[in-house]
Amino acid sequence: MAETTNTIPDYPRGITFEQVWAALMEDREQLKKQREENDRLMKEWREDFDRRIEETDRRMKEQREENDRLMKKRREENDRLMRKRQEDYDRQREDYDRQREDYDRQMEEQQKKKDQELEEIKRIQKENNKLIGGLGNSIGGLIETLVAARLWEKFQGYPYGFTRVFRRMPIYEPGSTRPLTEIDILLSDTEWAMAVEVKRDMVIKDVEHHIERMKRIKKNLPAEAVGKKFLAAFACGTITDEARDAAFASGFFVLELKGESVELVQPPVDFNPKEW
């Protein structure tokens, strides 16, 4: 390692040590104010982001409550219909001996109606289950939607000309019909492809998981990435400092939610994007 020689700055003649010291203190104070301003802006952004999350949670809660109310109302209506049928059935049983033929005919008609109504109940339950299941992913879907919007434009200054975007691309092993894993967002052009993993709140453990996922994807590349240089990135709502540093150290780009858009986080000067 080359030895470092400490030299005394060649200050202009006529400047006293006190003047130099005062200038240094002034610079230090300005840096302190700048850091405080940056901290204030970051706090405001996080508070705004938390408000958005709270609003989304509130809407989800209201939607769940509305669904519960509708489902309860449908159950009560179904119970009422079933009780009414039972009452009709009991009355018909009283006349069974005298009206056997008419009874059989009525039972056949009622069974047909019952089957139709049960099919309608199953259809409604299936729609409700689909609706409720979708609510569980609404926040992640919101972030993923914001991320996917014109994501390719975030890499200006890099030699990537991404023109194609694919969401939730499944990855299969040869001969298998069950997905091995999934790429949240895949960007590609004629030379490059990039797998983007979307996280609401990113922690350092997510970096470790994505490294393993990329190893599996590399062995089973989707057709859109075959023969291309393959990169990887994270896009997240929030991220810890440790996770950001680990992502850069592993060769991942990092994009972070800023307001209603996603911005590319400036990597360190020694950042080297990993080609998988």
Image (tube, rainbow, N blue to C red):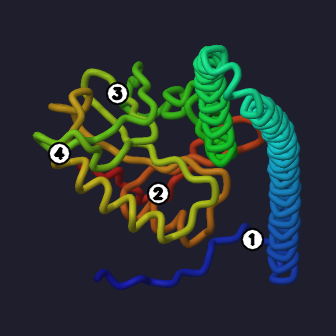
State the residue position of label 1. 13
* Labels 4 and 1: the sequence-earlier one: 1
> What secondary structure is found at the residue carrying circle 4?
loop
Q: Which mark is residue 269?
A: 2
User: Does 176 appear above or below 246?
Assistant: above
Give the Cα separation between the discs numbered 1 and 2: 36 Å
**243 left or right of 272 in image:** right
Q: Residue at x 86, y 66 (%)?
A: 36
What is the spatial separation of the Cα atoms under label 4 and label 2, in whole angstroms? 37 Å
* 145 sits to left or right of 176: right
Give the x, y percent position of residue 50: 83, 55
Distance from the alpha carbon under mark 4 to that under mark 3: 21 Å
Q: Which one is in front in this view, the residue at disc 1 or the one at disc 3?
A: 3
Which of these two is toward me, 211 or 32?
Answer: 211
Res. 216 in view: yes
Judge the density around disc 2: few (<14), some (14-19), many (≥20) Cα neighbours within 10 Å. Answer: few
Of mark 1 and mark 2, the one earlier in the sequence is 1
Q: Regarding mark 1 in the picture, which secondary structure is present there?
A: loop
Gap between marks 4 and 1, in whole Å?
Answer: 73 Å
Q: Which amino acid type is shown beneath numbered disc 1? A: Arg
Q: Are marks 3 and 2 in contact (CB under 8 Å)?
A: no
Q: Secondary structure at mark 2?
A: loop
Q: Mark 3 is on which residue type?
A: Ser
Q: Which residue has dot 3 on it? A: 188
Is tag 3's residue or tag 2's residue first in the polypeptide sequence?
Answer: 3
| Viewer-closest of 143 and 34 | 143
